[in-house]
Amino acid sequence: MVFRSSTSLIGLLSLPILLLPLFRPVSAIRLGLIHRHSPDLPLFREAPAFRNGQECGSTPDHVINVAMTLDANYLRGTMAAVLSMLQHSTCPENLSFHFLSANDDAPELFSSIRSTFPYLNMKIYRFDSNRVRGKISKSIRQALDQPLNYARIYLADTIPEDVKRVIYLDSDLVVVDDIAKLWGVDMEGKVVAAPEYCHANFTLYFTDTFWSDPALAKTFKGRMPCYFNTGVMVMDVDTWRKERYTEKVESWMAVQKQQKRIYHLGSLPPFLLVLAGNIKAVDHRWNQHGLGGDNFEGKCRSLHPGPISLLHWSGKGKPWLRLDSRKPCIVDHLWAPYDLYRSSRHFFEE
């Protein structure tokens, strides 16, 4: 079930709350329990157990691999994203989550995820931040400079080799459609599939230094100058490994770090330099991005017209922070029904 463009904004805001009971019955085990594993991590309510329908297969061919990073600052967003995928999936037990963490608190983060989703099929991997730390150049926003923001470049080298395809997702989003629809996209030989935007001002992603250098400017010769957001990607990680795409992306990071400043926005531009105009385009409904506003102020933004399968708060503003500040944007109320967070005050009241 998805949102349609003809839906009014007021009606749209009520849909997540109204639709939740309409999905097939789920088994709720100890739904009210709250677990606390570290004083530095938020408290979360245990989610219901979501079970496969009779039509779901159970062989390895039916597994849907989803990769996300795991960070204490974004843990609340991760919980909401996972819940949204399970809630809207026809075969939730076929979802297999791969979490990448770069911090020493990985065991606590894993424990928090496990206690919130006891039946989740998942693994956690330690991402060595030293692998990328010396390659990062300062961007326009500090959050974009964190090593874990670059983990998607090394995803194929981190997860097991028997994983051939994976959906990579940021933690500041919710899925409001069956993720299996995105998983089933025909890659047509491309290494990445994602919503593509060919009417964006592509020149803004790179510096004047880049465009004034003839050798660099011809990088996109013969390619459509199309932007794609790296927070939602279907990745053929098998091909990524074989064709050494990690090294291709790293080579542009080296130009930025060691030679001249050619871009501003963290891990996105080197992806564009390697892949822009050469990905499998999927429907825009799979990344209604920019809901967090710009990278400086995070002002409220409205939804784009059209059907929606995934809502993405890319940008500075995050829905959980704006809701807590009691200054939410209208679109933040679409995220709220998936929030499993419980404050300490709520914990003691229960």
Image (spheres, helix red, strand yellow):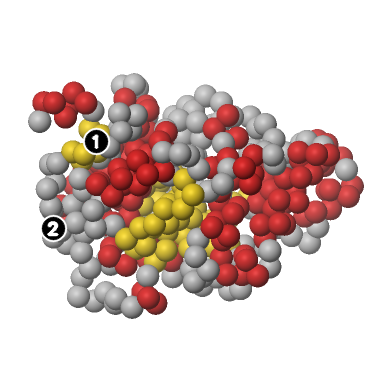
Name which residue lies at 42% across and 33% down: 73
**Where 89 sits versus 231, above or below?**
below
State left or right for residue 318 relative to residue 259.
left
Asked whether the beta carbons under mark 2 and mark 1 sit within 8 Å of each other, the answer is no
| In the foreground, 275 or 237 | 237
**Where 146 sits versus 305, above or below?**
above
| In the foreground, 106 or 99 | 106
How many marks on residues?
2
- Inspect this view and state whether residue 81 appears: yes
Q: Which mark is residue 36?
A: 1
Image quarter hosting the C terminus: top left
**Which of the two discs, 2 and 1, labels the residue nearer the N terminus?**
2
State left or right for residue 289 relative to residue 123.
right
Which class describes the residues within 10 Å of circle 1: few (<14), some (14-19), or many (20+)?
Answer: some
Mark 2, residue position: 27
Q: Position of residue 241 (x, y in %)?
A: 62, 66
Camera-nearest label, 2 or 1: 1
